[in-house]
Amino acid sequence: MQEDNYRHKGMRQQLMQVLKDKGITDVAVLNAIGTVPRHVFLESSFVEFAYQDKPFPIGSGQTISQPFTVAMQSQLLNVSRGMKVLEIGTGSGYQACILAEMGAKVFTVERQRNLYNKTKPFLAEFPYHIKTFLGDGNKGLPTYGPFDRIIITAAAPEIPEALVNQLKIGGIMVIPLNDEADATKQRMLRLTKRQDGTMAREEFGDCRFVPMLKEIGND
Ligand code: SAH
């Protein structure tokens, strides 16, 4: 793994301030952003870009989400230490590390074989509770549920029924759901599972993610 020095730590402090200025208030989220070395998730030649508030290509046609998006989804998730969190779309593994740094037990699913093969051993180098799976996130992880929290980090065409079933009562799902009127963007939703199994729905503006696809693949 690439080194993490005082210069990187300084850049993370600046990124924390940028995210604060953009409205992130959850101290646990900000501290996790200040702790997890985002530059090690990028090729070493792109270190200068790691602490800008921008998404970045990570190969296999996928991106590491913008820090603001990671922070916003983490904040909406309202995670407490010890919670079981299911993430759909492992990608670089950065979001999984942020949640794990906040004390969550993270179960993360990636459908793309190349990324999974790269990210699984990489995540094992961190001192976190993160289990990585190859699979179609639409199906969730029935044998590991139910989960306190579910975070989807790809653009979902619909709310996956299997994931609703794997969420505890009172549990929260954060999901970028395709905007029916505009196929280029999504609405960020927070869904909370009620006692009767129905979902309370809150909306938090527009966002843009790579599409959530079906089945395992290499595309
Ligand atoms: N959370 C990631 C960003 C993910 S980008 C990070 O922190 O870097 C979205 C990811 O979702 C991509 O890696 C994509 O391959 C994956 N994905 C798309 N559809 C999926 C599905 N059905 N199941 C699991 N992963 C999926």
Image (tube, grey):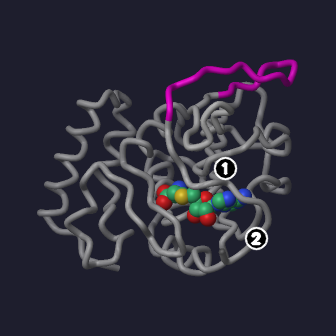
Residue picked out by circle 2: 216
Q: Residue at x 55, y 34 (%)?
A: 77
Would residue 195 be counted in the magenta stretch?
Answer: yes
Give the amino acid at mark 1: Leu
The quadrant in which the C terminus is found is: bottom right
Residue picked out by circle 1: 86
State which region is magenta.
Answer: 191-206
Give the amino acid at mark 2: Ile
| Badge 1 or badge 2: first in the primary sequence | 1
The quadrant in which the N terminus is found is: bottom left
Classify residue 55 as left or right of residue 48: right
Secondary element type, mark 1: strand
Label 2: how many Cα within 10 Å (few below 14, some 14–19, many 20+):
some
Would residue 154 be counted in the magenta stretch?
Answer: no
Q: Residue at x 67, y 54 (%)?
A: 212
Residue 90 visible, this orientation: no
Quick check: is the Cβ at mark 2 less than 8 Å away from ligand 1? no
Residue nearest the viewer, comparing 190 with 166? 190
Label 1: how many Cα within 10 Å (few below 14, some 14–19, many 20+):
many
Q: Label for residue 177? A: none
Tell us which disc is closer to us: 1 or 2.
2
Height in image: 50 above or below 181?
below
Classify residue 29 as left or right of residue 106: left
Mark pair 1, 2: CA separation: 18 Å
